Amino acid sequence: MAAFLLGLFLFVSQPPSVPSRPTINEAGASSKTVDYEQRRASSIQNQTQTAVHPNGTRQQLPQTIIIGVRKGGTRALIEMLSLHPGIAAAESEVHFFDWEDHFEKGLQWYASQMPFSYPHQITVEKTPAYFTSSNVPERIHKMNPATRLLLILRDPTERILSDYTQVFYNRKQKHKLYQHIETVLIKNGDINMDYKALNRSLYYIHMQNWLKYFPLSHIHVVDGNMLIKDPLPEMKRVEKFLNLSAQINASNFYFNKTKGFYCLRNHGRERCLHESKGRPHPQVASPILDKLYQFFHEPNRKFFQLIGRTFDWH
């Protein structure tokens, strides 16, 4: 009954009006708020910066964070962003804001997980779980309200299938039991609302939480489907959002027919994403796919309304 009521709620309820930030009527007050946030962010950055390396680099808190979504294309995004000389990207997912044992170590520890960067570079980290973790937006805002956030999304049904595929292969490699895709998607003849992967694809619910702390102008949504098909236009939009010089160009990408997706080329070196990326999804019966497409129609509409743009999703 609980699952049924939750499903009914998702379809019937309308997303509340979520202000990007509290409205400030007077320009003077608004300017003071911005100045205060900048001074606060600068103070925190100064307190957490490590000693300067002889070559002029140092570790510092990220000014840009890729917050998700899981199986949305975050690895491809940070690899492509790393083509830009103005970017210093963390190699691994830090999970600072969503893992309590990491968060308790403090911002100094967080900064120590970042790459060494030059003063002119933007430090970037990615942890896809941030987007769907309820307490993360407030924590990032307290660290630095001026943080620029990158969110890469894809068709929610495709994202679920990719999510399942990752878990399937992980369990298979460890010789563990796994459930068939139809079993986790459908429960008692209806969409299984208890399936975590499904809830990760309810983008509008999570976006509402982020917009309580950050203005939409601080969040750039990357079209994950288009990044796979034609990466350059998406990366030019990212460059613009981060106020980076135009450095990434068509010569940085080439289509690998064997793998079936674009690989990267930089200063004569070529590299593709790990072989775990781009795995074939399981075959799903058409009636079940139709159920998913129908289910996500209204949540997608609410998400499009929140961000003021649409995507070519089912």
Image (cartoon, helix red, strand yellow):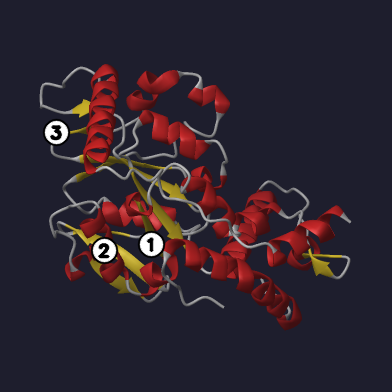
What residue does disc 3 label?
119
The residue depicted at 13 percent of the width and 38 percent of the height is 120
What residue does disc 1 label?
222
The residues tagged by marks 3 and 1 sit, at their Cα atoms, a distance apart of: 26 Å
What residue does disc 2 label?
237
The one nearer the camera, 152 or 81, is: 152
Q: Is residue 285 above or below residue 146?
A: below
Q: Position of residue 180 (x, y in %)?
A: 77, 63
Type of amino acid at the residue the image marks with label 1: Val
Type of amino acid at the residue the image marks with label 3: Pro
* Dot placed on the residue nearer the N-terminal end, 3 or 1: 3
SS category of the residue bearing label 1? strand
Q: Quadrant of the C terminus?
A: bottom right
Q: Quadrant of the N terminus?
A: bottom right
What is the crowding at mark 3: few (fewer than 14 residues within 10 Å), some, or many (at least 20)? few
The residues tagged by marks 1 and 2 sit, at their Cα atoms, a distance apart of: 8 Å
* Dot placed on the residue nearer the N-terminal end, 2 or 3: 3
Residue contact at pointers 1 and 2, CB within 8 angstroms: yes
